[in-house]
Amino acid sequence: MTKKGYVYILSNPRKTVLYTGVTGNLGKQVFAHKNKIAEGFTRSYDCNDLVYYEIKDSLEKAQVREKEIQSECRLGKEALIKRFNPEWKDLSDELLAIKKR
């Protein structure tokens, strides 16, 4: 069975910075960002609000989609987020609650 892949966008509390990433375990990855375990860009820019995600059939498909999203300009990413999450709320609590069920 092929493992699912996830492409996601994180933002900082002021919604001025966007980070697009890919993972095979979205819950674990979001937890790492929230708890500052993940080093690098997201930690430096306080990007730990999950504002968008997609589930793909494989990690490879998620990586392809990540590149597509990364190639978008800021306005394109904002439009994508607004269609999925109009209020730009942090979706991590919902995601982690679903994982606990």
Image: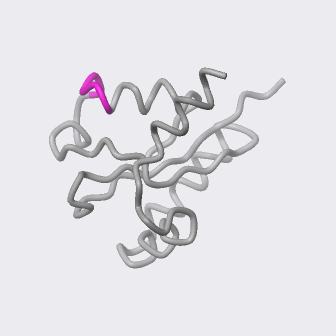
Which residue does the image show at 24% across and 27% down from the upper left? 36
Magenta stretch, main secondary structure, is loop
x then y, percent, for residue 95: 55, 36
Q: Residue furthest right?
A: 1
Q: Along the horizontal axis of the image, is 96 left or right of 61?
A: left
Q: Along the horizontal axis of the image, is 55 left or right of 90?
A: right
Which residue does the image show at 31% across and 41% down from the upper left? 48
Q: Report the coloring of the rendering.
A: one colour
x then y, percent, for residue 51: 44, 54
Q: Provide the residue span drawn in magenta.
A: 34-38
Q: Along the horizontal axis of the image, is 49 left or right of 17?
A: right
Which residue does the image show at 50% across and 54% down from the upper left? 52
Q: Quadrant of the C terminus?
A: top right
Q: Does the magenta stretch include residue 77?
A: no
x then y, percent, for residue 43: 21, 36
Q: Place residue 76 in its image quadrant.
A: bottom left
Q: Quadrant of the N terminus?
A: top right
x then y, percent, for residue 74: 35, 73
Which residue does the image show at 57% across and 46% down from the upper left? 63
Q: Along the horizontal axis of the image, is 77 left or right of 57?
A: left
- From this view, report whether residue 15 is shown above or below residue 38: below
Total numbered circles? 0
- From this view, report whether residue 79 is shown above or below residue 90: below
Q: Looking at this view, is 40 or 82 the one in front? A: 82
- From this view, report whether residue 31 is shown above or below residue 47: above
